[in-house]
Amino acid sequence: MSKNDNKITEGKRQSACLPRKRFYRARAHSNPLSDSHFPIPFSPADTDYSQHYPNFVHSNLKIQFADIGCGFGGLLIKLSPLFPNTLMLGMELRDKVSEYVKERILALRSSNLGQYENISVVRTNSMKYLPNYFGKAQLSKMFFLFPDPHFKEKNHRRRVISIPLLDEYAYVLDVGGIIYTITDVEELGDWMKHCLETHPLFATITDEELSVDPVFELLACATEEGQKVARNGGQTFHAVYRRIAFVE
Amino acid sequence: MEEEILTEETRREADAAPALISIHPLQKSIALALGSEVRIFDLEKENAVTLTDEACSPSHSDAIRAICFGANGSLFASAGDDKLVKVWRTDTWHCIKTVHSDKRVSAVAISLDGLFVTFADKFGIVWIERLEEDGQGQISVGTKAVPLLGHYCSIITSLKFSPDGRFIATADRDFKIRITVFPKCLPKGAHEIQSFCLGHTDFVSCLAFIHLPDFRQSLLLSGSGDATVRLWDHVSGCLLDTCDIGKQAGLLKSNEIIKDFPAVTDINAFPDGSLVAVVIQGFHGVVILKCDVSSRSIFVAKIVSMEENFTPTSLVLSSSANMLWMVMGATNVSKSGSSELARLLVISNVDKYVSNEQGDCPVILEDKNIPGGEKLLLKLQGSVHLAKQDAAFTAAAAAVKVAMQNLLAKKQYSVEKRDLRKRNRNDRKFKK
């Protein structure tokens, strides 16, 4: 079999193996307040990541990027080749969606040998269990792309960015680590910006710094949700902040 | 239909509130909370104390869920389901502060310097309020606290300050203990998390700090619904030792898989950690633990079983008097009307459980030998003789257990039942 043929079958297999979204129809929302019935690690040491990253078993690397509410995994897949030696974890609460991402990553791995080995996904409620996955100052980047806007005031406490939750994000982020948020809902954009602006452990990042950050341009275009917004010609609102050291 | 009735019944039982006990750090007075009532007995003057509260009367209108003395004993705080936090001066027993909470209060603590009261509500937010020092005749009413920190929509079960005052520890029903740096600048909140102590496999119910004088270091003890007591280095969040109390007290057989573990419901320690007393749900007695400083371990020193079906709901150690005070009881709202029951027991020479020195053995004091005697029992228990109440106490203990399980334990549903619950969601009921 010639090299060319090989490529063709590989390409075919890829299209055959990639999971199709239509078989993973999911609800748009999930209640973050309800008691979770899926298994949660009791502590960061409790999780066996060798199953998530079989190629990195002996590397002693720790996860550095977390995509909170990773949805269908578009960002992870774009980030993976950019940072091939950084472990990244997507967290998604919706069962079917996380299942889809899992299949998608496995399919990508098998069709592109040696690639996409540094990304994985877990089904979890990151608002409740983030410290069960990551230790203090472990992460260098966190992503919150197009989170659920929760318009009603009584549901504002369900928003993934809030002052009390930023305390926990500051705990898992190393000093200098960056938190990326983007939304197409202006009200939520203002809210996230306000929370990050008032939080004493986060400082704003200048536009010049952002313009040279290769990750920043992915925020609006990498995810499925972002592409939808772009398709409809919608506006996006971002807030990117850096974790700073605690001073009394 | 049947299920609906059942949930209605459990909801009633959820109102059962355990009796709570707390003691002045120098054993000057003892406080017992039963239902909406705080009962205080002055141990120095040996008389019952009447609380004066000019803001409202009665002070509390619903079950009290948390009481505590401040570190130096000059202040006392009470809080509960009526969404009020009251701070009292312990010399005059005047209410110096009433703080209104939006939600029901589950834990309360006074900062070491006595300048602040902090409390946790049912939504997992910890609030802080300044206590003015000019408190002579000044009574501030209706103030609103500012948020200090939050556990994400979890119920906070315990709130404690570390002995050095640097940290505030909070435990929740999601198995977590959070150690937060207590800030110097308060209006900004406490945002720097020192550590999370993770390892419990069920709700964390109680916390106690100990201070090791030789090592100039504090450690943290925690009790949980997983029937263990754990010892932590709270600065690093490192688990030092686990004491499987349920198994050791013979409540859990190792070869048997039991669904509901006997929960550890209260823990109290001598400040130096030499003796730790633990309440286990449904156990007739207390378990005494010893903390070994050099090996950083905890182990069972003595299992004290008690007669007459005494299952304590709360306990407190008095290091100055070397005594262990225990209370059993609950307020129970049942079909036959509400009932309030409390029974007090005291063990003297309690340190002999953990030391081999010569001296008097620990004794469960007879009623007349309790400090304060019958006068104290009359005030705190409501009556001196509580014979023939065994059945009522057993019912109260059962109600407290159900209430605690409903409130804190994670509910397990089968797949079918979960689907059924999803279909019957509240927001869908109205559409039918």
Image: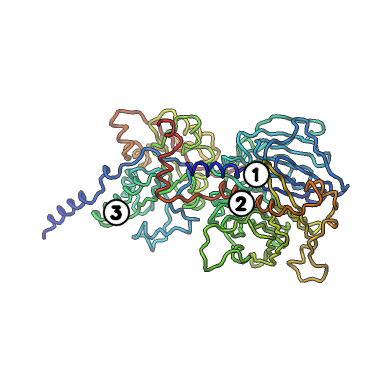
Location of residue A97 with respect to A190 vertically, above or below:
below
Circle 3 residue:
A106
| Quadrant holding the N terminus of chain A | bottom left
Q: Chain of mark 1?
A: B
N-term-proximal mark, 1 vs 2:
1
* x 45%, y 46%: residue: A125
Circle 2 residue:
B401
Element at label 1: strand
Mark 1 or 2, which is nearer the eye?
2
Circle 1 residue:
B107
Element at label 2: helix
For marks 1 and 3, give the CA distance. 47 Å
Residue type for callout 3: Leu
Return the x and y of residue A84 as percentages of the image width and height.
Answer: 33, 52
Mark 2 residue crowding within 10 angstroms, few (<14) / some (14–19) / many (20+): many
Element at label 3: helix
CB atoms of marks 1 and 3 within 8 Å: no
For marks 3 and 2, give the CA distance. 47 Å
